[in-house]
Amino acid sequence: MFLDIAWAMAPGQDAGAQGAGSMIQSLLPLILIFVIFYFLLIRPQQKKGKEHKQMLDNLKKGDKVITSGGIYGVVEAVGTNTVALKIAENVKAKFGKAYIATIRPASEEE
């Protein structure tokens, strides 16, 4: 009697193949979401970070810059991790290199 019940409850031979297909179908939306996030969020952020690092590596004396705090200045000296900026006549300040947001274009007014 119990043997008949056990056979009735056992999965068929096609159940293994169907389970694998079902698993792929359930993971497909997650994979699709990851791909969309990669191209819309992760990749542009990495590109922007790479451009900022290249800009900091090419920083030289005389460049007009803006810090992330909004301070306008002219580069006086460049160290490995710091930048000395002239922000007014006889006023120099030292900033972390990572806090330089952008180089001002030459056409911008003072």
Image (cartoon, rainbow, N blue to C red):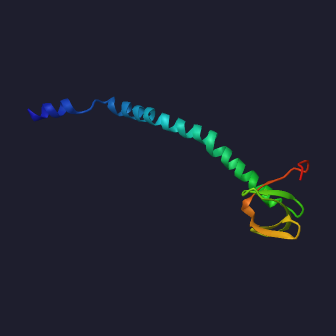
Quadrant of the drawing holding the N terminus: top left
Residue 61 in the image, given as x and y percentages of width and height: 88, 64
User: How many labels, in total?
Assistant: 0
Residue 45 seen: yes
Residue 88 in the image, given as x and y percentages of width and height: 86, 64
Residue 80 in the image, given as x and y percentages of width and height: 77, 69
Residue 78 seen: no
Left or right, 35 with respect to 79, comes to left
Left or right, 40 with respect to 77, comes to left
Residue at left 90%, top 50%?
109
Left or right, 50 with respect to 72, comes to left
Residue 37 in the image, given as x and y percentages of width and height: 58, 40
Residue at left 90%, top 62%?
62
Up-down: is 92 above or below 10?
below
Up-down: is 103 above or below 78?
above
Residue at left 35%, top 34%?
16
Name the foreground residue: 4 vs 66: 66
